[in-house]
């Protein structure tokens, strides 16, 4: 009798356990099917005015305006360390948060592979969702600067490296810094000798230039166009393989200035590492639809960006090859970890 009772008891426990399991799976499945059920946050890990900030706001604006995503999308700025500070938080505290997305660009690779200020977290600590745009670097001075060409700047640095202050909206060894010192390196200047000052975002770097706290800045070509149009700055050269269109169409490339180098700045959107399949599929579908919309094309034109959409799978493969390129560049500059 006791044996029979134990057997019945165990069967009951097993049945309850299986029911609970089934209920949990059903709840999870229903949760994914109903995603999103509340507002979504899109983080730009920098101050206002830079490429990440503008990209995040353009995504939010387009998704909300087209109703591709009916739940509201808000943008939060979380500056610090050229994106490395928030990257640490995102890769640890938001690892399961399907409602927190992140806009990033090459620093997600650079910060993870450079020696100084190294971040232990990289793209493998996220779920890459899509690449959306392509941009290039720009070397910029104030409108009344004595420097007329990129070689003017390089000659001045070669003569007295401490006499020229280069600034950018990212940490030493990160994207703006690499864009700025790449021409110097190719010109035969020790990149470690270049005086570089970092700011949290392109907007702050521009403010430093206009305020006389920097002689030259390295920044994104797209974000500087409005300052060129207003007459506040001049762009000496861009890192594209050929001349750009629009406001910067008269600006020479590095190649034209005798610098055998180029630098592409892609921008993309990432989810948390443990993103559910349902949320990933949802975002993948919506981002592909957004990239083909007229509203998004207007944002590209307004910001001077070039469209370059890659889906999640292709984007992840691209990141792998780009990481190899970044490591090679950092190694050449003796800045790899």
Image (cartoon, grey):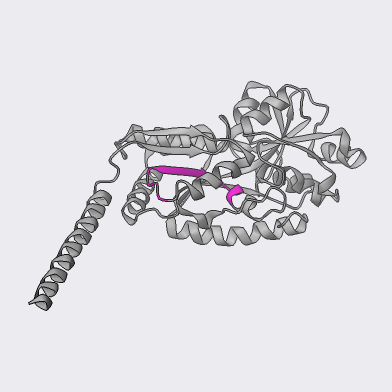
* Vertical relation: 302 (above or below) 27: above
Instruction: Depth check: give the residue in front, 242 or 66.
Output: 66
**Quadrant placement of the C terminus:** bottom right
* Outermost residue, right side: 159
Residue 277 in view, yes or no: yes
Residue at 68% in and 35% down: 250
* Vertical relation: 225 (above or below) 68: above
Residue at 64% in and 36% down: 249
Q: Which residues are magenta?
A: 96-108
Is residue 188 located in the magenta-colored stretch of the structure? Answer: no
Residue 269 in picture, x, y percent from top left: 47, 46
* Outermost residue, front side: 2
Label tally: 0
Instruction: Depth check: give the residue in front, 28 or 318.
Output: 28
Residue 307 in view, yes or no: no
* Outermost residue, left side: 1
Task: Classify residue 29 as left or right of residue 306.
Answer: left
Residue at 49% in and 59% down: 316
Residue 238 in picture, x, y percent from top left: 68, 41
């Amino acid at each position: 009798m006791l044996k029979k009772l134990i057997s019945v008891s165990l069967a009951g426990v097993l049945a309850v356990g299986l029911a609970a399991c089934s209920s949990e799976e059903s709840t999870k499945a229903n949760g994914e099917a109903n995603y999103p059920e509340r507002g979504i946050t899109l983080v730009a890990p920098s101050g206002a005015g830079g490429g990440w900030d503008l990209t995040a706001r353009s995504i939010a604006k387009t998704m909300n305006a087209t109703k591709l995503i009916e739940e509201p999308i808000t943008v939060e700025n979380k500056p610090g360390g050229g994106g490395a500070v928030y990257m640490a938080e995102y890769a640890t505290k938001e690892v399961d948060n399907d409602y927190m997305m992140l806009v990033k660009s090459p620093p997600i690779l650079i910060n993870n592979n450079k020696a100084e200020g190294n971040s232990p977290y990289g793209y493998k600590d996220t779920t890459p969702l899509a690449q959306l745009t392509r941009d290039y670097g720009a070397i910029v001075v104030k409108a009344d600067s004595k420097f007329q060409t990129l070689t003017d700047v390089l000659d001045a640095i070669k003569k007295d490296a401490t006499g020229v202050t280069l600034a950018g909206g990212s940490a030493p060894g990160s994207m703006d810094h690499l864009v700025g010192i790449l021409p110097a390196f190719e010109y035969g200047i020790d990149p470690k000798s270049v005086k570089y000052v970092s700011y949290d975002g392109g907007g702050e770097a521009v403010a430093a230039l206009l305020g006389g706290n920097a002689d030259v800045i390295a920044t994104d070509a797209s974000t500087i166009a409005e300052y060129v149009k207003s007459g506040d700055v001049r762009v000496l050269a861009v890192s594209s393989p050929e001349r750009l269109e629009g406001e910067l169409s008269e600006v020479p490339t590095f190649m034209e200035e005798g610098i055998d180098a180029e630098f592409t700045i892609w921008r993309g959107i990432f989810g948390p590492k443990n993103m559910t399949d349902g949320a990933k599929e949802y975002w993948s579908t919506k981002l592909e639809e957004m990239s083909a919309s007229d509203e998004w094309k207007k944002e590209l034109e307004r910001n001077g960006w070039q469209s370059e959409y890659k889906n999640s799978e292709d984007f992840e493969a691209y990141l792998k090859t780009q990481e190899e390129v970044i490591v090679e560049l950092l190694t050449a500059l003796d800045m790899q970890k």
